[in-house]
Image (cartoon, rainbow, N blue to C red):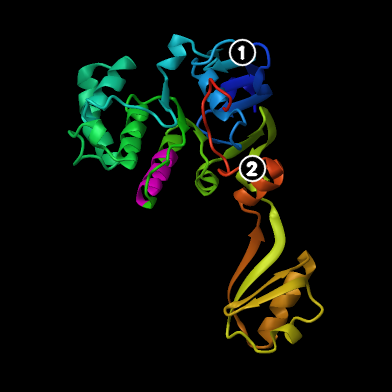
Amino acid sequence: MPGSDSLISVRALAKTFGRRKGFRALDGVSLEVGRGSIFGLLGPNGAGKTTLIKILMGLVPGFEGEARVFGRPAGDPAARTRIGFLPEAHRLPGYLSGRQVLRLFAMLSGKERAWVEQRIPAWLARVGMESDADRKVREYSKGMSQRIGLAQALIHEPELVFLDEPTDGVDPVGRAAVRAIVADLSARGTTVFINSHLLMEVERMCDRVVVMDRGKILREGTVAELTPRTGRFAFELEPVPPDLERLLAGLGRELECNQRGFELALAAAELDQVVDRLRAARVSIRSLQPGKLSLEDAFIDMVGGNVGGNVVGGNTAGGGRA
């Protein structure tokens, strides 16, 4: 990816917490994130994900290497006004209402009050918080607080957005709304940087994914590149012939029959032969689905035994975990 197209550019980034027996949160990380992309950051607890985000936000000083955002050093005030940020486990002022939170954070980013007031109703509707906009934040559930937190990260129309666990505590309907918002942001040219432990959400939202562990990047690529096909195929049949094993004898391996059809590992040349035999037996193929690794399977293969209770969490940037 050419550097001129990159909103985020990181070169040999390293960060150690503690002076004597320091914890190496980042160890030589290099990556590029392009305009309009949806970029996913995965890794087990302690991988360095949140430390990386906070360095790019200018919240963690004293690092080695280079971190640039919009071509400026990370933390540059001119760059920060163009960024939206939803931290993990954020704490919004409990004495403010949701509407007041949106007004405050948008104006802190340099927007005029009249401009902000025009956009507040639309964003409240977008995150499903119109009816609760004038309640105090301290009265919100976790999911409601997360929705308002997302709106405050986006209301000033940033060019780059960091979302750290954006669907944490949000119900399935809310997660679908978050996915729609993220897709719309990308379509408008906004770059979205997501750190999430919900691998299915990352798989559905992100264009590219980086997998980190122990401060290093293990793999980077598109979701398709990280979730290759397995060589297995799932067939749904009507009817399912009672002599299915005999019908498929000599083709493929690891046949698994079920009430709706079967799964079978096949070489490329064998797939057509299976279809031909089924048709010759007057069996209708209702669906044929090639199998592939899920992002969760690929992730576990990469990090192996380092996965703890949370598959991929994200924690502090100043202590033992990142």
Indicate left or right for 158 with 129 as reference.
Answer: right
| The quadrant where residue 26 appears | top right
Tell me which corner region of the image, top left, top right, bottom left or bottom right, holds residue 179.
top left
- Above/below status of 179 relative to 112: below
Up-down relation of residue 43 to residue 92 (above or below): below
Q: Position of residue 190 (x, y in %)?
A: 45, 30
CA gap, disc 2 and disc 1: 26 Å
> Which image quarter: residue 264?
bottom right
Which contiguous range is marked in magenta? 173-183
Which residue carries the number 1 mark? 63
Quarter of the image with the C terminus in it: top right
| Amino acid type at image mark 1 | Phe
176 drawn magenta: yes
Residue 101, position as x, y percentages in the image: 26, 26
> In the image, 167: left or right of 204?
left
Nearer-the-camera pick, 117 or 309: 309
Residues tagged 2 and 1 counted as in contact (Cβ below 8 A) = no
Residue at position x 66%, y 77% in the image: 257
